[in-house]
Amino acid sequence: MFPFTRMRRLRNTEALRAMVRETSLSPQDFIAPLFVRHGENIKEEISAMPGQYHFSVDTVLTECAELAALGISGVMLFGIPDHKDATGSESYDDNGIVQQAIRAIKKALPDFLVIADVCMCEYTDHGHCGIIHDHYVDNDETLEYLCKQTLSYARAGVDMVAPSDMMDGRIQAMRRALDENGFVKIPIMAYSAKFSSAFYGPFREAADSAPSFGDRRSYQMDPANANEALREIESDIEEGADIVMVKPALPYLDIIARAAQEFKLPIAAYNVSGEYSMVKAAAANGWIDEDRIIIESLLSIKRAGAKIIITYFAKDACRIMNKH
């Protein structure tokens, strides 16, 4: 009881605050998303995401070397194809842009973790995450193409695959395809609770993946639903997921926390493009302290229970942490 208990005593100096700090960040917590495209000597800034770029394979090697030197765990690759069609054929072409990047990165940096996002939206001419029939995404036919994509990435040497499509049954189908083709060691990080979110807006420009009609609410989750998110996570675990993800991160900290309490496997969270771009825009206008906002945001994600944070702030966060 006051005055014997004074909570402020342990906040009095930075040394005391650091000593009792409950949550800490490390470069190893971070996965950096990167966008790769065909060509040479390309490093073009994405206008909606200042500080993020489209890379060609040669320049992505330089970026990965910088990330590795900072101690960041790895990267998640998204591809920008030269050609789009109804089935997203470049996504499962062994000479596709992501496959080229995987081979190059693993050759140059064999111990650096390379994760490939598995989805069709960047590669299809309609911008949806699966095969379309009568303006509707056919769940079961889409699974066949997701497995083709997964196996192509595996043949290229990827360390982990991360399906973001939100089709039912895709984890089981991908796990079976990997195992039957001799890739039993490749883990699956499932975008399990992926919400149909307005926070993805800048990514649509970065990946050129906006749907040509309708939206993705028939397969991505309703933002109002928490119990359903836990059912999705549980289902993916039962189907063989090694890591489960909540996306976006900051508007869904409650889902991250519940998942971390209920499921005893690594929880990932994706600190998405809209969360990134809002901070960058506010900082550019002088409205916020950018460095403090970045660290506070990432701490909140980890404090909620995420073991892995996929974030465009990975390099910024390392820079900030290295100041102190």
Image (tube, rainbow, N blue to C red):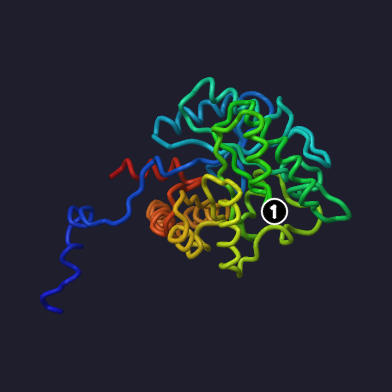
Tell which residue pokes out farthest to the right in this image.
134
- Is residue 42 at all visible to an observer of this figure? no
Q: Secondary structure at mark 1?
A: loop
| Amino acid under disc 1 | Asp
Q: Quadrant of the C terminus?
A: top left
The relative height of residue 58 versus residue 293 in the rendered view (above or below) is above
Nearest the viewer among 85 and 228 is 228
Q: In the image, residue 111 lies at what x, y percent?
A: 46, 26
* In this rendering, position of residue 298 left or right of residue 166: left
User: In which quadrant of the rendered view does residue 160 lie?
Assistant: top right
- Single out the residue that lies furthest toward the left: 4
Nearest the viewer among 319 and 16 is 16
Left or right: 83 in relation to 299? right
Quarter the N terminus occupies? bottom left
Question: Dividing the picture into quarters, in which one does residue 90 lie?
Answer: top right
Per the image, the residue denoted by label 1 is 168
Mark 1, residues whose alpha carbon is within 10 Å: few (<14), some, or many (≥20)? some
**Does 197 sit above or below residue 141?**
below
Residue 314: x %, y % from top left: 45, 43
Task: Decide which of 213, 115 is in the foreground and name it.
Answer: 115
Residue 212 in the figure: left or right of residue 9: right
Q: Is residue 300 above or below residue 308?
A: below
Q: In which image quadrant can residue 98 be found?
A: top right
- Locate residue 137, reporting x and y percent: 79, 53
Q: How many marks?
A: 1
Identify the residue at the far top of this view: 107
Q: Is residue 202 visible?
A: yes
